Image: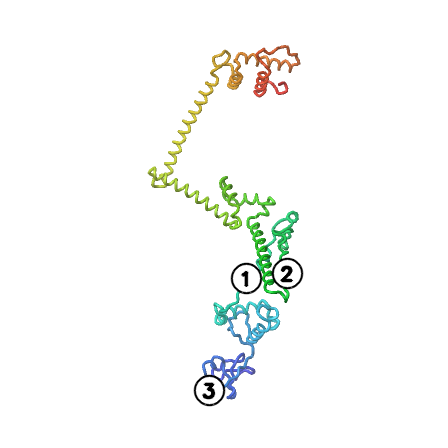
């Protein structure tokens, strides 16, 4: 005996309490959805008879495996809400569906089932014909919000903000590029009696103002991309030293300085990639020249190049040693030639190389220099001991020669500076 309150299909005897089809011409004929769709006939009932849908509101349209367990009654309320409140008003739609559904659940269910689900794929075409052009798109349209949408504020301190006149919440400066640009549109108004010429003139003013805004924003973007504000504040030197992957040569720095006008046409990353690629090209060319040199010397394998480089290094070292020895002999010969005028005079062998050079430059014989040196040092020692100096310098020592010899003896440490 059937349980009280439950309904069963008269054909397959399956429970049909949530949803069933009742024949309007036959009494007590109720079929399940499967038998009805197959056209089941029993007794006087025929498939072409009229029917009535009896919905208990508890069955799901998407099957028991669908997420959330939405009933047919909730689905109907959801479709009514989307038609009444419009797409996007999820809070009003959730209140219309019932307190058991949150706005987030309503949005996720509608998007997943009716847009991205099989129903949406069958009903929404891939290409929409006669689609209206969206002029507010962020790709630079006439009404693009990218012209007025502020960038994230700069990461600088309050003192630095005051120094720059920077307003972080608006991403503006007290003095902007082309500060008087707003005067083009500040007095514009559209009147009903404007003729075509006046309307076109006002449109031209608006177009000029939009161009100035774009140029202002372009300059801000360049300043952000190349970190010009931290560079102005002196905060980017340490960061650049940390981020530097290789040592920049003097030639590259000069080339970067010459190509600075290209900053406005390239992003910072593109500019750095340009010089990185130029450096790679330079290294590759040097490597190619090295391989060509190996080939000219008969080397065809890389393992042979190490032995070749070791031999070449030894050969260059021998050349350097020979050139250094030749240079040393040349300096000695030059030194001998420099002292040729006084080397045969008496007392020459008693002098140091510096004293020989001094005598040669002053055209002073070694014996006279030794005499003057002895007198000056003797006077210096007597003064230090508090003994009055009675010695007199030779007559051939004028003031210039005396001063030169005193300076030399002071620099050499023979006498102290206070005495000189």
Mark 1 and mark 3 lie on one chain; the one further toward the N terminus is: 3
Towards the viewer: 400 or 52: 400
Towards the viewer: 378 or 1: 378
Label 3 Cα crowd, 10 Å radius (few <14 / some 14-19 / many 20+): some
Q: Residue furthest bottom?
A: 44
Q: Secondary structure at mark 2?
A: loop
Give the CA distance from mark 1 to mark 3: 58 Å
Give the CA distance from mark 1 to mark 2: 26 Å
Q: Secondary structure at mark 3?
A: loop
| Residue position marked by numbered label 2 in the rendering | 188
Q: Is residue 46 above or below residue 237?
A: below
Q: Residue furthest left?
A: 298
The location of residue 297, given as percent across then percent down, is 34, 37
Scheme by which the image is coloured:
rainbow
Give the CA distance from mark 3 to mark 2: 76 Å
Q: Is residue 361 above or below residue 122?
A: above
Quadrant assignment for the C terminus? top right
Residue that appears at 52% across and 74% down: 61
| Residue position marked by numbered label 3 in the rendering | 46
Residue that appears at 56% across and 61% down: 142
Label 2 Cα crowd, 10 Å radius (few <14 / some 14-19 / many 20+): few
- CB under 8 Å between callouts 3 and 2? no
Give the number of the mark in front: 1 or 3: 1
Give the number of the mark in front: 3 or 2: 2
Mark 3 and mark 2 lie on one chain; the one further toward the N terminus is: 3
Give the number of the mark in front: 1 or 2: 2
The location of residue 11, given as percent across then percent down, is 47, 84
The location of residue 86, given as percent across then percent down, is 58, 71
Q: Is residue 88 left or right of residue 304?
A: right
Q: Which mark is residue 137?
A: 1
Q: Is residue 392 above or below residue 99?
A: above
């Amino acid at each position: 005996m059937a349980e009280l309150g439950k309904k069963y299909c008269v054909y397959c005897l399956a429970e049909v309490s949530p949803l069933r089809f009742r024949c309007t011409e036959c009494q007590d004929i109720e079929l399940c959805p499967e038998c009805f769709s197959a056209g089941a006939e029993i007794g006087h009932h025929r498939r072409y008879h009229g029917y009535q849908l009896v919905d208990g509101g508890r069955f799901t349209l998407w099957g028991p495996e669908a997420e959330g367990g939405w009933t047919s009654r909730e689905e109907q309320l959801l479709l009514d809400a989307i038609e009444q409140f419009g797409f996007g008003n999820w809070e009003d739609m959730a209140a219309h569906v019932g307190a058991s559904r949150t706005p987030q659940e309503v949005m996720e269910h509608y998007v997943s089932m009716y847009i991205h689900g099989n129903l949406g794929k069958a009903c929404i075409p891939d290409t929409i014909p006669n689609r209206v052009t969206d002029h507010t798109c962020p790709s630079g349209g006439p009404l693009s919000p990218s012209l007025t949408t502020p960038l994230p504020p700069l990461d600088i301190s309050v003192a630095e903000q005051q120094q720059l006149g920077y307003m972080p919440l608006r991403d503006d400066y007290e003095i902007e590029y082309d500060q008087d640009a707003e005067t083009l549109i500040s007095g514009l108004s559209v009147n009903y009696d404007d003729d075509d010429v006046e309307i076109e003139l006002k449109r031209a003013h608006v177009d000029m103002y939009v161009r100035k805004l774009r140029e202002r924003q372009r300059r801000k973007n360049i300043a952000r991309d190349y970190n010009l504000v931290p560079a102005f504040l002196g905060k980017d030197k340490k960061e650049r030293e940390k981020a530097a992957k290789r040592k920049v040569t003097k030639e590259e720095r000069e080339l970067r300085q010459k190509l600075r006008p290209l900053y406005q046409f390239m992003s910072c990353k593109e500019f750095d990639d340009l010089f990185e690629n130029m450096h790679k090209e330079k290294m590759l060319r040097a490597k190619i020249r090295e391989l060509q040199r190996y080939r000219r010397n008969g080397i065809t394998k890389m393992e042979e190049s190490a032995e070749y480089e070791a031999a070449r290094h030894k050969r260059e070292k021998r050349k350097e040693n020979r050139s250094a020895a030749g240079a040393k002999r040349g300096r000695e010969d030059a030194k001998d030639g420099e002292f040729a005028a006084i080397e045969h005079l008496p007392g020459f062998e008693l002098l140091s190389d510096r004293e020989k050079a001094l005598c040669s430059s002053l055209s002073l014989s070694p014996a006279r220099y030794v005499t003057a040196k002895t007198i000056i040092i003797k006077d210096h020692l007597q003064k230090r001991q508090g003994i009055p100096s009675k010695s007199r310098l030779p007559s051939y020592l004028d003031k210039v020669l005396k001063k030169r010899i005193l300076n030399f003896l002071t620099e050499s440490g023979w006498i102290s500076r206070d005495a000189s």
